[in-house]
Image (spheres, rainbow, N blue to C red):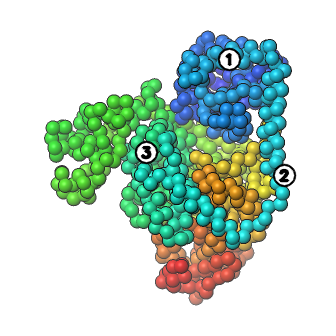
C-alpha cells in the first residue's frame, strides 16, 4: 500500500511512496505523532538525482525487515532537500557538528521536539567501510531511547542550544565598518589564494572529486578584466577547455554532469542539474565574449539547447534535474562500446577512413573502455591532429564529427532515458532565466529571448501568492511552500538580465518588487539576509547560510541585485543594504575565496564603481551591439525608444532613463560612472571611445 508520500508532489518523495516504511512528509502531523506515541524521529533528507540516496532506498527502505524496525520504533520523515533547503541546512549543520562531515542521503535522529541527537549520511545494509548496518543502527538507537532516553534528550537540547548560540552570535555582531576603497585588498588576497590553489595540470581547483565551480571561474575572469593579468585568463580558459573536452561534458546531448570522481574531468557522477548548467552556460558565454573561442560558444548553445529539449516544461518552466542511473546502472545511458559506435555509423574498425574509427579516435572509445568496460566520450585528439591522418582540413573533420554526434544522439535517444525530476524551483529557474536572457542578447538568438520571456511569464503567474510573494516549487499545476531568499534573489537577478535583453520595463518593475520583498522580509538588522522570511515556519533557528557552494548563496546574489538596482535607480537604500552585507563578509572572502566566490564578484562590482548606460532613441541596435561585443560585468544598461525626454511613469519605472532625450531625434547614449556623467554621444564611434577604458 502507498504510504503518506503518495499525496506529495515532489518526484523524490513520490519515489518513496511505495516503500514499506510508514513515511511522513515534513510537517506538524509527524511531530504530533512522535509526541503522542513517544517515539524518536528518523529524518532522511535527499534529492532525486542523488545516487547514494537511491542505493540506501533499495538496500534499506525497500527492505521489509528494515522497514518493520523503522515503523515499530520511529516516526520516519522523508524530506526533499531541494524543496526544503531550510530543513536541510539546519540538520546538516547538526550532522557536521556531530561527525565533522556531511552529505546526502542525510540520516538524522531527533527527539519529538525536533532536536537532533545522532546523525550521519549513508548507512549500508550490511556492516562495511567501518559503518554499522542501518538495521544495527536502528536497533541501537531504539535501545538507547528505551534505556537512556534522558541522556539522548539532553544531548539533543545541548546540540540545539549550541547551534542556536552560534546563529545568535552571528546575528548580534558589533557594528561593521562601511566598505571603503581599501577593501580592494580583499579582492587581491582572494585572487592570490585562488592562484595558489589552482590545479595547473588539469584546470580547476581541488582534487578528486572535482567540481566545476563556475562562481570561482567567473570571479577570476572578472579579475582578469580588472587587472589585465593574462595568467588569470589562462586559468579560466584552461579550466573551461578541460571541462569541455572531458567526460563531465555530454558530447552528444550537451550540458554538464554534476562533477567527476577523479581530478581530470573524466568520470562523472552522471546526474545533470539545472543550476550547474545555468551557471556554466553563463561563464562559457562570458569567456567567449572575452576570447572569441568558438568552442565556448558551441558549449553555450549546446547546453541551452539541451535544456530546451529535455528540461523545459511546456508552459515555460525549467525542470530541476536528470538522474544518473538507468535500468539500475549509473551512467548506462551515456557510455559506448566500439560495436555500438559501428552499429550507428558507417564503416568498420578495420577501415581507417571510416567515420566510426574517426569518432573513436576523437573521443577515446576503446575495447577496454574507461568506465566499467565501456567508454565515456571525451576529447583525446583534436580535429587538427586527426586531419593529418584522415585527410582534409580541421574544419572538415569537425563537420564529420558534428554529423556523427547527431547520429549517435539520435541512436542514444532509443535507450531507456534517465528519469527527470520535473519539479520547477523558482530560484533555479532564476539562474536559467539569467542564462537564456543573457545568451539571447549576446548571441542574438531570438529563440532564447522568447524562452526567457516565457519562463518569466510562467514563474510570475504560477509561482506567486498573496502580495506578490514567491512560492518555492511547482509540479503538475500545483505551486506550494514559501519562497526562500535564494528564490527572490536569483529570480530578481534573472529579471534584471531579461530587462537588459528586452528593455521591457515590466521585467524591471518585477525585479524591483522582489528586491523590496527581500528588504521587507529577509533583511537581518545586523547585516545581510536570512534564508527564510520573517513569517516562515518556526524551526530550531532561522538559517542564514552565507557560503557559496554549488549554487551561490542567497545573500551574495541579493547583495548583487541590490547593488545593480542602486546603479539603475540611484536609491541609497539599495546601496546601503548591499554594502552592509558585503562588509560583514570581509574575513570570509579574503580567507576562503573558494567558498565565497559569488560574494567576491559582488564586491568586485561594487568597488569597481559600476557604469550606467542609458540609450534613448529610435535605433539603439548599433550601440547595443557595441557594448555587448565583449564582456562588461560592471555595466548596467537601460534603453528606450523616444524622441524627447523620458518623464512621468516611464521615468519612474527605470530612473536611469529619466530626463534623457534623444538629441535632435538621433539615438543618444548617456554613460555615467559613480554619480558623474560623460557628455552624451550620438555615434557608435564616440560611444566606443567612452567605453574603451
Q: Secondary structure at mark 1?
A: helix
How far apart are the alpha carbons under marks 2 and 1? 39 Å
At 63% from the left and 39% from the top, the residue drawn is 82
- Residue farthest to the front, as pictured: 196
Residue assigned mark 2: 172
Whether residue 110 can be seen here? yes
Q: Secondary structure at mark 2?
A: loop
User: Taking 37 as reference, is 669 above or below it?
Assistant: below
Instruction: Give the class, few, some or many, for how many residues have Cα within 10 Å of label 1's Cα (few <14, many ≥20).
Output: some
Residue 363 figure quarter = top left
At 51% from the left and 66% from the top, the residue drawn is 224
Disc 2 to disc 1: CB gap under 8 Å: no
Q: Does residue 141 appear to the left or right of 638 in the view shown?
A: right
Whether residue 461 can be seen here? no
How far apart are the alpha carbons under marks 2 and 3? 43 Å
Residue 667 figure quarter = bottom right
Numbered label attached to residue 138: 1
Residue 418 pos. (x, y %):
46, 33
Question: Front-most of 360 and 181?
Answer: 181
Q: Secondary structure at mark 3?
A: loop
User: Taking 200 as reference, is 615 above or below it?
Assistant: below
User: Taking 262 as reference, is 401 above or below it?
Assistant: below
At 19% from the left and 55% from the top, the residue drawn is 388
Which one is earlier in the sequence, the residue at label 3 or at label 1?
1
Which one is earlier in the sequence, the residue at label 2 or at label 3?
2
Residue assigned mark 3: 265
Q: Does residue 343 appear to the left or right of 111 in the view shown?
A: left
How far apart are the alpha carbons under marks 3 and 1? 38 Å
Disc 3 to disc 1: CB gap under 8 Å: no
At 63% from the left and 53% from the top, the residue drawn is 592
Amino acid at each position: 500500500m502507498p504510504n503518506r508520500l503518495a499525496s506529495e508532489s515532489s518526484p523524490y518523495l513520490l519515489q518513496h511512496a511505495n516503500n514499506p516504511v510508514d513515511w511522513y512528509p515534513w510537517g506538524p502531523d509527524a511531530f504530533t505523532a512522535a509526541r503522542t506515541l513517544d517515539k524518536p524521529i528518523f529524518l532522511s533528507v535527499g534529492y532525486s538525482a542523488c545516487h547514494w540516496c537511491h542505493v540506501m532506498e533499495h538496500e534499506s527502505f525497500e527492505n521489509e525487515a528494515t522497514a518493520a524496525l523503522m515503523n515499530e520504533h520511529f516516526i520516519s520523515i522523508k524530506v526533499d532537500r531541494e524543496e526544503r533547503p531550510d530543513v536541510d541546512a539546519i540538520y546538516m549543520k547538526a550532522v557536521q557538528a556531530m561527525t565533522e562531515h556531511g552529505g546526502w542521503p542525510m540520516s538524522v535522529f531527533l527527539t519529538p521536539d525536533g532536536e537532533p541527537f545522532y546523525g550521519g549520511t549513508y548507512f549500508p545494509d550490511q556492516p562495511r567501510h567501518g559503518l554499522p548496518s542501518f538495521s544495527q543502527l536502528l536497533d541501537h538507537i531504539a535501545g538507547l531511547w528505551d534505556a537512556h532516553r534522558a541522556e539522548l534528550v539532553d544531548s539533543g537540547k545541548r546540540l540545539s542550544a549550541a547551534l542556536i548560540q552560534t546563529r545568535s552570535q552571528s546575528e548580534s555582531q558589533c557594528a561593521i565598518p562601511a566598505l571603503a576603497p581599501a577593501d580592494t585588498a580583499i579582492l587581491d588576497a582572494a585572487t592570490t589564494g585562488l592562484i595558489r590553489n589552482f590545479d595547473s595540470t588539469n584546470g580547476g581547483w581541488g582534487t578528486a572529486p572535482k567540481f566545476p565551480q563556475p562562481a570561482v571561474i567567473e570571479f577570476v575572469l572578472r579579475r582578469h578584466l580588472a587587472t589585465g593579468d593574462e595568467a588569470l585568463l589562462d586559468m579560466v580558459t584552461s579550466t573551461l577547455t578541460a571541462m569541455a573536452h572531458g567526460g563531465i561534458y555530454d558530447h552528444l546531448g550537451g550540458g554538464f554532469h554534476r562533477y567527476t570522481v577523479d581530478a581530470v574531468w573524466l568520470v562523472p557522477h552522471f546526474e545533470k542539474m539545472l543550476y550547474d548548467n545555468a551557471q556554466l552556460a553563463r561563464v562559457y558565454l562570458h569567456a567567449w565574449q572575452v576570447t572569441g573561442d568558438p568552442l565556448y560558444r558551441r558549449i553555450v548553445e549546446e547546453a541551452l539547447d539541451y535544456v530546451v529539449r529535455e528540461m523545459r516544461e511546456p508552459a515555460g518552466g525549467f525542470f530541476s534535474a536528470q538522474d544518473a542511473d538507468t535500468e539500475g546502472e549509473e551512467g548506462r545511458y551515456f557510455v559506448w562500446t566500439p560495436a555500438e559506435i559501428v552499429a550507428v555509423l558507417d564503416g568498420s574498425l578495420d577501415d581507417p577512413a571510416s567515420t566510426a574509427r574517426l569518432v573513436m579516435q576523437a573521443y577515446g572509445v576503446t575495447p577496454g573502455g574507461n568506465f566499467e568496460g565501456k567508454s565515456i566520450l571525451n576529447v583525446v585528439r583534436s580535429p587538427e591532429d586527426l586531419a593529418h591522418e584522415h585527410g582534409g582540413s580541421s574544419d572538415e573533420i569537425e563537420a564529420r564529427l558534428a554529423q556523427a554526434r547527431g547520429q549517435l544522439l539520435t541512436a542514444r535517444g532509443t535507450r531507456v532515458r534517465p528519469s527527470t525530476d520535473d519539479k520547477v524551483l523558482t530560484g533555479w529557474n532564476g539562474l536559467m532565466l539569467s542564462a537564456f536572457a543573457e545568451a539571447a542578447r549576446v548571441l542574438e538568438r531570438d529563440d532564447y529571448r522568447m524562452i526567457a520571456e516565457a519562463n518569466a511569464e510562467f514563474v510570475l503567474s504560477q509561482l506567486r501568492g498573496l502580495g506578490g510573494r514567491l512560492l518555492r516549487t511547482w509540479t503538475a499545476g500545483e505551486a506550494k511552500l514559501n519562497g526562500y531568499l535564494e528564490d527572490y534573489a536569483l529570480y530578481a537577478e534573472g529579471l534584471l538580465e531579461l530587462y537588459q535583453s528586452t528593455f521591457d520595463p515590466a521585467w524591471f518593475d518585477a525585479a524591483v518588487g522582489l528586491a523590496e520583498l527581500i528588504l521587507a522580509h529577509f533583511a537581518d538588522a545586523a547585516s545581510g539576509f536570512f534564508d527564510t522570511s520573517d513569517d516562515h515556519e518556526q524551526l530550531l533557528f532561522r538559517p542564514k547560510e552565507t557560503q557559496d557552494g554549488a549554487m551561490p548563496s542567497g545573500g551574495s546574489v541579493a547583495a548583487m541585485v541590490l547593488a545593480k538596482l542602486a546603479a539603475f535607480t540611484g536609491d541609497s537604500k539599495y546601496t546601503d543594504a548591499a554594502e552592509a552585507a558585503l562588509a560583514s563578509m570581509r574575513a570570509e572572502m579574503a580567507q576562503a575565496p573558494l567558498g565565497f566566490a559569488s560574494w567576491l564578484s559582488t564586491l568586485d562590482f561594487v568597488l569597481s564603481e559600476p557604469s550606467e548606460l542609458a540609450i534613448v532613441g529610435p535605433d539603439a541596435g548599433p550601440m547595443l551591439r557595441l557594448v555587448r561585443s565583449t564582456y562588461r560585468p560592471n555595466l548596467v544598461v537601460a534603453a528606450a525608444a523616444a524622441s524627447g525626454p523620458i518623464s512621468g511613469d516611464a521615468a519612474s519605472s527605470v530612473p536611469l532613463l529619466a530626463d534623457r532625450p534623444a538629441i535632435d531625434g538621433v539615438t543618444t547614449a548617456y554613460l555615467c560612472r559613480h554619480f558623474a556623467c560623460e557628455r552624451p554621444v550620438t555615434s557608435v564611434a564616440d560611444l566606443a571611445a567612452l567605453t574603451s577604458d
